[in-house]
Image (cartoon, coloured by chain):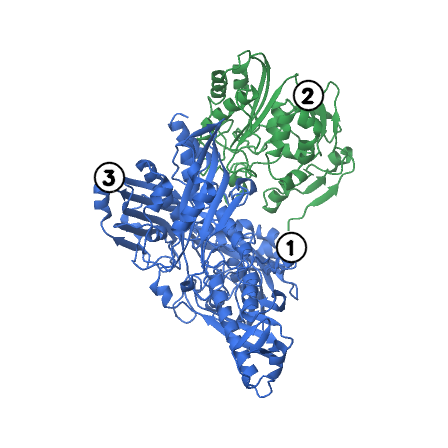
Chain colours: A blue, B green
């Protein structure tokens, strides 16, 4: 079952519209609708707020503001003084007059209908006192504004320095010292952040669009001073998250606050424009890349330093921009330093492949520049510098398949047919590019339960989420394989905080963690079934000789067997077992990464500088493939995300107010169908038992890492123009073309 | 909710006497109403009027009803054959879903996509006359380089209207007093000056009923080129419509219009003057393009539009003249 191409078990429900996402849940009584009123300033405080006109509107129930809502635990703190992180701390809103960032909620208009709430929101009059805010990181900041984060996302050190990069740069035959920049980006999940909150009998129930249920429970308890047992979350389907739903945001907090205040269910669905400011985005980055190499292209030094914004309030978050540089290539001198500058922007947080997504773009671009300088095939440069041990730590790799990805990918693509640079075809320039891809593999703690009913049907229960990745499907496969049942005999129930706690979906750790816990549960259940068959007083197989095992949906002792229904019958109506998983010593002992290589061809309009991809191939290695269909979807989804990151996506910031001018999908340009050529995916990996019970590695983020570098490199190969400021929009290519007289 | 009256007109007469604001596809107006930017008291739905057909006109042109959808117009066999620049312009705009809803008349009257016009927390002279313009010193990558003023640098976002202007289209309108008039497509929109909230010459309650496309000289070559930030569903950074007639290598007629660069679909009269009587030649095309952009002014983030427009005009002319291969995107 595991590893077989299995169609999504929830697919029919989704295409029929029968999969209930948070805002779809039918709740009695019909929820009121809440509409968020956003601060129109960047930083400062509310001086007065006049809701009278809004409250007079027909259909309006209440306008909630800081003046008429119960006090919450202050933003960033906890109910009991315990430590909390950005996902579990209080996310209080309307809890005072302070405006921390542009677009922060200053009121929630609650009405019987969406139209009434939205219309009345236009009538809420707020006056502010405005403070000066800092909204952009320019690279010109003085030293005293540069903050050393306590740690980087994923727990890495902010600084990893070994050897002497300056000496390497001074002495090497070939050196490169360049700056790459990436803009702010938004996760852009298809389903906007949404919540229905119900407050009854001292219990807060949320139908919530979320990635990690456990963190959300803690955050809500910490926000409202509740016990965790008073909060229940139901999240059977989530329409994408990409990091932006790791934690709770304005919809969850405000819907809860309103439901508790009004003692009536309240629904808050963020609008697309609201998601840009009341949910997190990826910060911009300025990256300095230094490479030193000898005449043969052997790396003597790698420098990758990063400067990014960090929210000035409540929590620390810093991307491990140089994660790829620390993990990919052998070098005697490594200089990776991360600094952040505090800004007063909307929340800055994890977005798909924090670190590698933007860092690999710069690193792989710089390597291409070095290859060009050396007159070396960029593929060959990478092959000459692969690492035997993790460069930053010297630890052995659990497995390292980068060479195979590069070689097999190149072969499948026909890389050796790469033409000379600057091929002209009418008014188009044509080019080829490649890049490597490394993404950290993580395993978390998780638990699961498996039940067998009297008919011998299985039901897996865990608080895992399915954010569109295929959790339902792979967990069905894992349970079916573990019990020797057909897929149809297994039901998987997810997304309920009453079920055993997993780590949810994030950091590409979901499949290995939830799947590993479930495998452990089925193993435990199998052991129990054998024990009952052999030892139970009423068992027809009592005392039978031979090996005990579970296969084909039956319990075997030697060559005799019992049906599940018969074994369950021995103990009454039901049998269940729990299972768990936790990172073990292999997580400490071995450096764990998934790998890939990207190859692309594209054309550039020589008149306008527009770039159009023509072909993209990714060769990936990520341990055991749990399901080739859903795995491929993850990978091509990642590649598509990376195409947008390289060519089209930029969330602009007006430095005067911190406002995002292009906060809708007409002007924030995700890659659309026509920007994405047919994507070829090759899956090369073999099970890596050091990476967890299933031997799989995470792939939710892998496909995105590196493809932007391949695209930028192909633009250079096509035109001779090196764009280091992402995204590669026509204006930037055009400036380069004109500068070289094209 | 802000209440408004909605009435559905059965005849043109009903429509023009029924109110002073019309709604057709609503692809832009409804959005703006939700944001509180448009606040009509009363809307007259004109989608049921018998204005949804394309007819042959006397003298060899076409008469297009104002309620013909963008999809129907783009895919009409006569339009594709006789006015390919219009078909291509339409298909390069928006998405299939939007084109299925949007009307010919409404497309002319769609409003700017200026970020600061949409964000009611910012100053905008178009939205709140006299409040100021936050685009001028703000993020103005998508803004105008021609025809703008110190009060407004917003662009008109239409692709269709650019082709219409190049085709010398004329609008037929009906006013509430029953009178009709003809307005050249090029004369429909006004430059902002110090009244950027006055965007066009139509009076309140004046309805566009038809658009006339005059016949073109035999052998006219059509090109529509659009530079944009992604391959589909993006407004033009710069677009160019060209209708070119040559006799040997002599240019007998050249019409050029630009999108994405000005507060209105921009007829490139200076370029046309430079092309008049000239010979087909890349240098001629480049000089014509440069002449058009001579007074162009960037505002920082949109400075690139000046060379982009220059190059795109020259290239589109070269394509129309058969010097450059086309582009079948």
Which numbered mark, 1 or 2, is in the foreground of this view? 1
Q: Which residue is mark 1?
A: A15
Q: Is residue A329 left or right of residue A475?
A: left
Contact (Cβ within 8 Å) of mark 3 with mark 1: no
Which numbered mark, 3 or 1, is in the foreground of this view? 3
Q: CA gap, disc 1 to disc 2?
A: 48 Å
Relative vertical location of residue A705 with respect to residue B223 in this rendering, above or below: below
Dot 3: within a 10 Å radius of its alpha carbon, few (fewer than 14), some, or many (20 or more) residues? Answer: some
Quadrant location, the N terminus of chain A: bottom right
Mark 2 chain: B
Q: Which residue is mark 3?
A: A173
Q: What SS does tag 3 mark?
A: loop
Tell me what residue is drawn at x 23 percent, y 41 percent. A172
Number of on-image labels: 3
- Residue A651 appearing in the image: no
Q: In this view of the protein, which residue sits in the foreground, B134 or A523?
A: A523
Tell me what residue is drawn at x 67 percent, y 43 percent. B41
- Residue A275 appearing in the image: yes
Mark 3 chain: A
Q: What SS does tag 2 mark?
A: loop
What is the x, y in percent for residue A310?
A: 38, 53
Relative vertical location of residue A180 with respect to residue A1 in this rendering, above or below: above
Q: Which residue is mark 2?
A: B214
């Amino acid at each position: 079952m595991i590893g077989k191409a299995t169609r999504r078990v929830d697919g029919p429900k989704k295409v029929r519209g029968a999969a209930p996402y948070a805002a779809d849940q039918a709740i009695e009584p019909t929820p009121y609708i809440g509409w968020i009123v956003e601060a129109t300033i960047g930083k400062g405080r509310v001086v007065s707020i006049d809701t009278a006109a809004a409250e007079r509107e027909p259909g309006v129930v209440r306008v909630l503001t800081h003046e008429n809502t119960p006090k919450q635990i202050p933003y960033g703190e906890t109910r009991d003084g315990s430590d909390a992180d950005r996902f579990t701390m209080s996310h209080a809103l309307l809890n005072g007059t302070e405006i921390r960032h542009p677009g922060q909620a200053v009121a929630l208009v609650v009405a019987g209908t969406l139209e009434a709430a939205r219309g009345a929101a236009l009538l809420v009059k707020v006056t502010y006192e405005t403070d000066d805010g800092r909204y952009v990181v320019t690279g010109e900041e003085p030293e005293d504004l540069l903050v050393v984060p306590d740690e980087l996302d994923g727990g890495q050190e902010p600084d990893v320095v070994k050897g002497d990069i300056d000496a390497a740069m001074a002495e090497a035959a070939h050196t490169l010292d360049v700056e790459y920049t990436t803009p702010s980006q938004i996760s852009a999940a298809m389903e906007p952040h949404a919540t229905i909150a119900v407050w009854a009998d001292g219990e807060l129930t949320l139908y919530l669009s979320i990635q990690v249920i456990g963190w959300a429970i803690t955050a809500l308890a910490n926000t409202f001073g509740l016990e965790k047992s008073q909060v229940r979350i139901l999240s059977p389907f989530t329409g994408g998250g990409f990091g932006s739903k790791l934690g709770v945001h304005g919809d969850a907090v405000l819907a809860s606050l309103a439901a508790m205040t009004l003692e009536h269910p309240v629904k808050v669905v963020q609008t697309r424009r609201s998601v840009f400011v009341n949910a997190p985005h990826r910060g911009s980055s300025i990256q300095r890349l230094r490479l030193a190499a000898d005449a043969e292209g052997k790396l003597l030094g790698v420098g990758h330093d990063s400067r990014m914004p960090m929210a000035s309030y409540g929590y620390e978050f810093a991307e491990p921009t140089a994660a790829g540089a620390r993990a990919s290539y052998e070098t005697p001198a490594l200089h990776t330093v991360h600094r952040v500058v505090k800004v007063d922007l909307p929340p800055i947080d994890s977005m798909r492949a924090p670190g590698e997504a933007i860092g690999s773009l710069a690193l792989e671009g710089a390597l291409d520049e070095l290859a060009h300088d050396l007159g070396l095939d960029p593929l060959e440069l990478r092959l000459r510098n692969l690492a035997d041990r993790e460069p930053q730590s010297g630890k052995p790799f659990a497995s390292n398949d980068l060479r195979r990805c590069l070689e097999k990918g190149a072969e499948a693509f026909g890389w050796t047919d790469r033409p000379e640079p600057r091929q002209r075809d009418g008014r188009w320039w044509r080019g080829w590019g490649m890049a490597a891809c490394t993404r950290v593999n993580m395993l978390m703690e998780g638990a699961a339960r498996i039940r067998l009913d009297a008919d011998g049907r299985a039901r897996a229960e865990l608080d895992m989420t399915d954010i569109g990745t295929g959790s339902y499907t792979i967990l069905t496969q894992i349970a079916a394989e573990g019990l020797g049942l057909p897929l149809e005999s297994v039901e998987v129930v997810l997304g309920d905080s009453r079920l055993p706690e997993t780590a949810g979906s994030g950091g590409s750790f979901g499949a290995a963690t939830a799947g590993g816990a479930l495998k452990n549960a089925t193993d435990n259940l199998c052991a129990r079934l054998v024990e009952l068959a052999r030892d139970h007083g009423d068992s027809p197989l009592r005392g039978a000789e031979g090996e005990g095992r579970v296969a084909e949906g039956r319990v075997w002792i030697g060559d005799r067997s019992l049906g599940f229904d018969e074994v369950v019958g021995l103990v009454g109506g039901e049998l269940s077992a729990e299972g768990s998983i936790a990172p073990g010593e292999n997580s400490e002992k071995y450096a764990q990464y998934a790998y890939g290589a990207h190859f692309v061809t594209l054309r550039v309009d020589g008149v306008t500088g527009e770039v159009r991809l023509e072909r993209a191939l990714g060769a990936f290695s990520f341990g055991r493939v749990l399901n080739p269909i859903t795995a491929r979807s993850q990978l091509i989804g990642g590649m598509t995300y990376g195409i947008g990151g390289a060519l089209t996506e930029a969330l602009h910031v007006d430095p005067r107010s911190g406002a995002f001018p292009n906060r809708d999908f007409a002007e924030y340009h995700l890659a659309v169908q026509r920007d994405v050529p047919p994507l070829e995916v090759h899956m090369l990996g073999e099970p890596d038992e050091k990476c967890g019970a299933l031997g799989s590695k995470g792939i939710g983020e892998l496909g995105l890492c590196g493809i932007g570098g391949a695209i930028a490199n192909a633009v250079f190969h096509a035109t001779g123009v090196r764009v280091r400021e992402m995204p590669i929009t026509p204006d930037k290519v055009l400036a380069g073309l004109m500068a070289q007289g094209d | 909710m802000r209440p408004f009256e909605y009435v559905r007109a059965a005849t043109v007469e009903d429509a023009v006497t029924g109110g002073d604001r019309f709604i057709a596809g609503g692809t832009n107006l409804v959005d703006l109403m939700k944001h509180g930017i448009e606040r009509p008291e009363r809307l007259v739905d004109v989608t049921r009027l018998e204005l949804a057909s394309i007819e042959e006109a006397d003298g060899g042109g076409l008469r297009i009803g104002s309620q013909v959808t963008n999809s129907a117009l783009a895919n009409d066999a006569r339009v594709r054959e006789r006015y390919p620049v219009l078909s291509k312009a339409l298909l390069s705009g928006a998405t299939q879903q939007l084109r299925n809803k949007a009307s010919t008349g409404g497309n002319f009257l769609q409003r700017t996509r200026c970020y600061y016009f949409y964000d009611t927390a910012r100053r905008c002279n178009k939205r709140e006359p006299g409040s100021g313009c936050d685009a001028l010193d703000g993020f103005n990558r998508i803004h105008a380089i021609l025809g703008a003023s110190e009060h407004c640098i917003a662009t008109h976002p239409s692709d269709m209207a650019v082709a219409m202007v190049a085709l010398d289209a004329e609008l037929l309108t009906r006013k509430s007093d029953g009178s009709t008039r003809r307005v050249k497509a090029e004369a429909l929109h006004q430059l902002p000056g110090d009244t950027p909230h006055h965007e066009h010459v139509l009076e309140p309650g004046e309805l566009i009923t038809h658009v006339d496309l005059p016949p073109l000289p035999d052998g006219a070559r059509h090109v529509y080129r659009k530079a944009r930030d992604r391959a589909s569903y993006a407004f033009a950074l710069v677009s160019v419509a060209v209708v070119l007639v040559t006799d040997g290598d002599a240019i007998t007629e050249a019409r050029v219009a630009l999108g994405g660069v000005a507060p209105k679909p921009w007829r490139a009269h200076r370029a046309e003057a430079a092309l008049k009587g000239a010979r087909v030649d890349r240098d001629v095309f480049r000089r014509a393009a440069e002449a058009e952009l001579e007074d162009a002014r960037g505002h920082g983030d949109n400075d690139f539009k000046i060379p982009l427009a220059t190059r795109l005009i020259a290239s589109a002319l070269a394509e129309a003249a058969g010097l450059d291969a086309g582009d079948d995107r």
